[in-house]
Image (cartoon, helix red, strand yellow):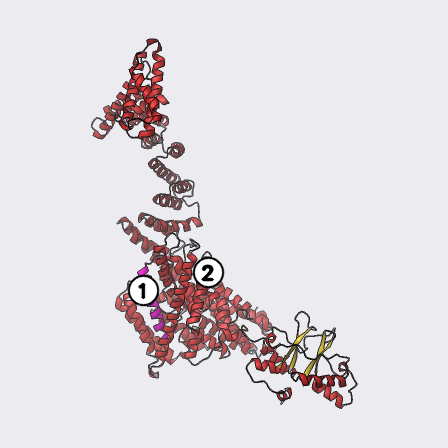
């Protein structure tokens, strides 16, 4: 039995694809179990440490002490385990070759458990993502996988963690692709889905089939209600920006404090939360039980409005002072409260046309998430998965997009990029990672000024080239076509070499291996398509040592559409044009 | 495929072994923690439920609902917690909330008798009577975990009481017919059924029920009173009178009963002296009574109609005045009596049309006699 297992593992070791699939499943299960433990620990401890009906002084002392202890631990032993974990995961992925140390994973788990259990107003989902990504990285490196493979497994762990933390398997995958990878079509999609599904299955096995929030079935009462959801989008967008700006501003202030105070700073956050919690206990911790209450319309306007404001302040000060914890959960809390406030006002004035405040709280959660985290796709799917309520999806999309748009306008830098920048790290933005908006070949392509025939002699080709040089931009290679069918490219150097050898009477077809024949393999032939980015064109020019490439049709690679010239490419990038193609060579 | 620099065989296998051990250990730890959490949650929910019930008993329904809500939040699948919550919300008159709570229960099991009964009460509370009746029916034919027959009977009584309050005689009768079969055969239940048949306007069935009881217990004054009402409603005034007298004799000290019976007796007497259709009356007495009816009806009209009378009513009024002044030819006595009765009915129709259904100044006897003639 053991021998057979050993053989199986040995075979797995030889097959990269099978290994990746098996690892995705194992990482999914392991991360799922770790996150379940994380949820149970933080939940149980929090319920014991600061019950809402407990003594008021308790609520001041506990977060202060908790953040003091975790602050010291973070400063002394786990400096990379601060904050939410999403910027850290992105840093590992894009800067640190996918490396997250086991020490950081341990630090994140224990420090976050302690700080969340003590009532710090942060969430557990961001840290979960970091823990998941970290575990994947540790396993991959221990197995000796290549850097690329390690990097590919980081989002796999991340999606498994989010699937378990939020009980949202689809949103877990989406978030990993949309925010962490910045590419919804990333090649890790399949493995991320596998790990997410495994993790979700483990969660259900241990904790049962319960959505994160239970919501009464809401529906659109009247079409005009969409207008109010749009207003909620505006409120959510502005609220999100206020939260992000406050958090970034406070963090900058804390960063300017003397270095020696770093370990003490989290206690300032803890004390602030404690003072707020003394008067309003609901502001402490993750607060999902209050979110559920507001989703079911069980809180009044004054309370929800107050909670929205207090939670913004509490979370901003907790995070910026350096405590361990995320902003996902607080975003949902803030959004739910803002939504309920808008919904209460709307329902008061237009009772016949609007649903109850709970419906708005539900949409508000997604709105704040889209505004703060800036992942509109993920937020729509996440709210749907969290509540399993499909009826509210259209208002949710409208509100989310408005909040996303406003947030983008008023706060250019997304929160995670801005946080990394404050730390002196320049993470690639979603825009910079996507092909969208990049320059394309079609923008610089031109008609070929001269097309040579394969049966043309070398001498007459050289004569034509000289004539062409007098009237147009100087080129160092020309397309060779038979009728309308492209045969390949011929370089001036090839013609000159043939002439010097006394082969001036030979045809072009005889002196050059044109590469593209009627029945030949066209894959290696140097060419670009009009929808290629200019960076692809540059890469191919570098590989083929040609400064001119033919632009061909995707439907028929022998159909010449035009040419793309190095000078034009450089000019499109804003680099000065060189006078002759010879200068490129120099 | 690029060659990877994978860990050595031992290290590779070792990592998988470590992962497997970690998976097993974590699974055990998680299951243990989850079990503790579930047990604590369950105990907490039970505490909340008990607290809620105590608050309900003290009449603090809104606070009780809060406790039940917290209990439901802990144990979502617990049907009893949801029912308790719905009951508290219903008592606190939070009908929409109670409705949504019950909807969730009914989505899980649409045949749940308790939930349907509660929903029926919510509908009645919101004055959505037809929907309420429908939920009562679902409760009657639904699933009950314990004492199904007793619960169904209880629900049917509740529905019948509602229908009686709504004065929906047709529906009431429809519910009473099966109840007659299902209900236990004790005197108390039979008396109630008899009264309900009276409310449903089925005096013949009511009389049957009361007579059935009297066969077993001929000394029950309430049954005589009920039978008197049934006979009265059937227009059988002498029988009504004798039953009322018997009830009065059997229960002499009860002032309320005596008052009621006295009123009924007086009315019966009035009707009997006014009713021209009574058997055995001589023709001249029938004629005299028919004239009396015309006179009383005309008098009632004159009290409420404006003078001069409406053109549509004028012909009938003229005919009535003429009939009252006319001299009787003995050979035409029966024909004139019938014509007078027709005239009295027409007058009463005019009165009902223009003066509404207010109690006539002459008392209840006149409309009852005219209704009997109409039958």
Q: How far, Cα to Cα, is label 2 from label 1? A: 26 Å
Which residue is the site of mark 2? A384
B118 sits left or right of A187 in the view: left
Magenta stretch?
A: A296-323
* Residue A338 is at least partly visible in this image: yes
Looking at the image, residue A129 lies above or below residue B70: below
Q: Is residue B255 left or right of residue B214?
A: left
In front of the other: B110 or B274: B274
Q: Is residue A321 magenta?
A: yes
Q: Quadrant of residue A455?
A: bottom right
Q: Is residue B364 above or below residue B338?
A: below
Q: Which residue is mark 1?
A: A306
Label 1 residue SS: helix
Taking depth in this image into account, of B71 and A485 the one nearest to the observer is: A485
Q: For the residue carrying disc 2, how many other residues have a C-alpha within 10 Å: few (<14), some (14-19), or many (20+)?
A: many
Residue B28 visible in the shown view: no
Q: Quadrant of the N terminus of chain B?
A: bottom right
The answer to which of marks 2 and 1 sits earlier in the sequence is 1
Q: Chain of mark 1?
A: A
């Amino acid at each position: 039995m053991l021998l057979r297992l050993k053989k199986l593992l040995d075979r797995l070791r030889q097959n990269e694809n099978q290994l990746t699939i098996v690892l995705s499943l194992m990482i999914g299960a392991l991360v799922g179990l770790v996150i379940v433990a994380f949820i149970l620990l933080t939940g149980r401890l929090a319920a014991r440490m600061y019950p809402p009906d407990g003594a008021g002084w308790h609520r001041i002392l506990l977060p202060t002490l908790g953040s003091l202890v975790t602050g010291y631990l973070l400063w002394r032993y786990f400096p990379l385990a601060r904050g939410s974990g999403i910027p850290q995961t992105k840093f590992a992925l894009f800067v640190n070759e996918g490396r997250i140390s086991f020490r950081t994973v341990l630090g994140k788990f224990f420090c976050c458990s302690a700080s969340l259990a003590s009532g710090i107003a942060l969430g557990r989902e961001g840290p979960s993502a970091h823990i998941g990504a970290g575990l994947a990285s540790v396993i991959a490196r221990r197995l000796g996988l290549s850097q690329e493979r390690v990097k590919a497994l980081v989002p796999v762990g991340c999606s498994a963690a989010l699937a378990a933390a939020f009980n949202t398997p689809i949103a877990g995958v989406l978030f990993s692709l949309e925010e962490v990878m910045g590419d919804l079509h990333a090649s890790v999609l399949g493995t991320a889905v596998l790990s997410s599904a495994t993790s979700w299955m483990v969660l259900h096995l241990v904790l049962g089939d319960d959505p994160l929030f239970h919501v009464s079935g809401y529906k659109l009462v009247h079409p005009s209600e969409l207008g109010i959801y749009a207003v909620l989008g505006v409120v959510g967008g502005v609220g999100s920006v206020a939260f992000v700006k406050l958090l970034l501003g406070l963090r900058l202030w804390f960063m300017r404090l003397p270095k020696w105070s770093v370990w003490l700073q989290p206690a300032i956050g803890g004390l602030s939360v404690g003072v707020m919690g003394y008067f309003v206990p609901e502001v402490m911790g993750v607060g999902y039980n209050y979110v559920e209450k507001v989703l079911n319309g069980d809180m009044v306007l004054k309370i929800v409005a107050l909670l929205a404001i207090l939670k913004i302040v509490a979370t901003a000060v907790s995070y910026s002072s350096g405590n361990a914890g995320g902003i996902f959960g607080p975003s949902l809390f803030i959004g739910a409260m803002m939504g309920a406030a808008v919904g209460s006002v709307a329902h008061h004035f237009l009772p016949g046309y609007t649903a109850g405040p709970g419906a708005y709280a539900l949409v508000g959660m997604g709105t704040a998430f889209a505004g703060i985290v800036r992942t509109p796709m993920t937020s729509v799917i996440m709210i749907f998965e969290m509540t399993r309520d499909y009826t509210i999806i259209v208002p949710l999309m409208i509100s989310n997009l408005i909040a996303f748009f406003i947030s983008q306008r008023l706060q250019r830098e997304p929160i995670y990029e801005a946080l990394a920048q404050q730390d002196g790290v320049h993470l690639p933005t979603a825009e910079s990672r996507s092909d969208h908006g990049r320059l394309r070949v079609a923008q610089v392509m031109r008609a070929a000024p001269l097309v040579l025939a394969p049966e043309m002699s070398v001498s007459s080709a050289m004569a034509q080239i000289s004539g062409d040089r007098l009237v147009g931009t100087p080129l160092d290679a020309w397309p060779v076509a038979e009728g309308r069918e492209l045969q390949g490219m011929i370089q001036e150097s090839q013609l000159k070499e043939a002439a010097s050898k006394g082969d001036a009477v030979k045809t072009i077809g005889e002196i050059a291996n044109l590469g593209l024949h009627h029945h030949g393999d066209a894959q290696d032939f140097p060419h670009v398509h009009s929808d290629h980015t200019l960076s692809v064109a540059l890469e191919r020019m570098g590989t083929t040592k040609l400064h001119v490439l033919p632009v061909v049709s995707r439907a028929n690679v022998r159909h010449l559409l035009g040419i793309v010239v190095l000078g034009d490419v450089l000019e499109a990038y804003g680099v000065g044009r060189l006078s002759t193609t010879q200068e490129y060579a120099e | 495929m690029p060659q990877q620099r994978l860990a050595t065989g031992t290290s590779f296998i070792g990592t998988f072994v470590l992962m497997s051990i970690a998976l097993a250990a974590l699974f055990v730890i998680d299951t243990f923690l989850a079990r503790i959490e579930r047990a604590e949650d369950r105990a907490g929910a039970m505490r909340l439920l008990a607290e809620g019930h105590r608050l309900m008993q003290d009449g603090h329904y809104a606070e009780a609902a809060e406790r039940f809500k917290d209990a439901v939040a802990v144990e979502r699948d617990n049907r009893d917690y949801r029912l308790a919550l719905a009951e508290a919300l219903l008592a606190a008159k939070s009908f929409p909330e109670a409705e949504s709570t019950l909807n969730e229960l009914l989505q899980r099991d649409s045949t749940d008798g308790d939930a349907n009964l509660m929903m029926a009460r919510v509908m009645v509370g919101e004055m959505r009577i037809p929907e309420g009746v429908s939920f009562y029916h679902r409760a009657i034919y639904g699933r009950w975990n314990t004492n199904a027959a007793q619960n169904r009977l209880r629900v049917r009584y509740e529905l019948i009481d509602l229908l009686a309050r709504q004065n929906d005689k047709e529906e009431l009768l429809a519910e009473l017919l099966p109840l007659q079969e299902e209900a236990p055969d004790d005197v108390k239940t039979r008396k109630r059924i008899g009264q309900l048949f009276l409310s449903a306007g089925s005096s013949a069935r009511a009389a049957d029920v009361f007579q059935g009881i009297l066969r077993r217990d001929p000394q029950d004054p309430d049954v005589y009173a009920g039978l008197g009402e049934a006979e009265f409603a059937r227009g059988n005034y002498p029988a009504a009178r004798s039953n009322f007298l018997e009830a009065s004799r059997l229960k002499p000290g009860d002032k309320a009963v005596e008052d009621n019976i006295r009123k009924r007796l007086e009315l019966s007497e009035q009707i009997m002296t006014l009713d021209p259709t009574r058997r055995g009356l001589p023709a001249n007495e029938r004629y005299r009574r028919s004239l009396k009816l015309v006179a009383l009806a005309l008098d009632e009209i004159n009290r409420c109609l404006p003078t001069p009378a409406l053109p549509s009513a004028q012909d009938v009024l003229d005919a009535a005045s003429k009939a009252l002044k006319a001299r009787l030819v003995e050979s035409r006595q029966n024909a004139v009596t019938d014509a007078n009765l027709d005239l009295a009915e027409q007058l009463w129709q005019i009165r009902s049309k223009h003066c509404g259904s207010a109690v006539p100044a002459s008392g209840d006897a006149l409309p009852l006699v005219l209704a009997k003639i109409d039958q």
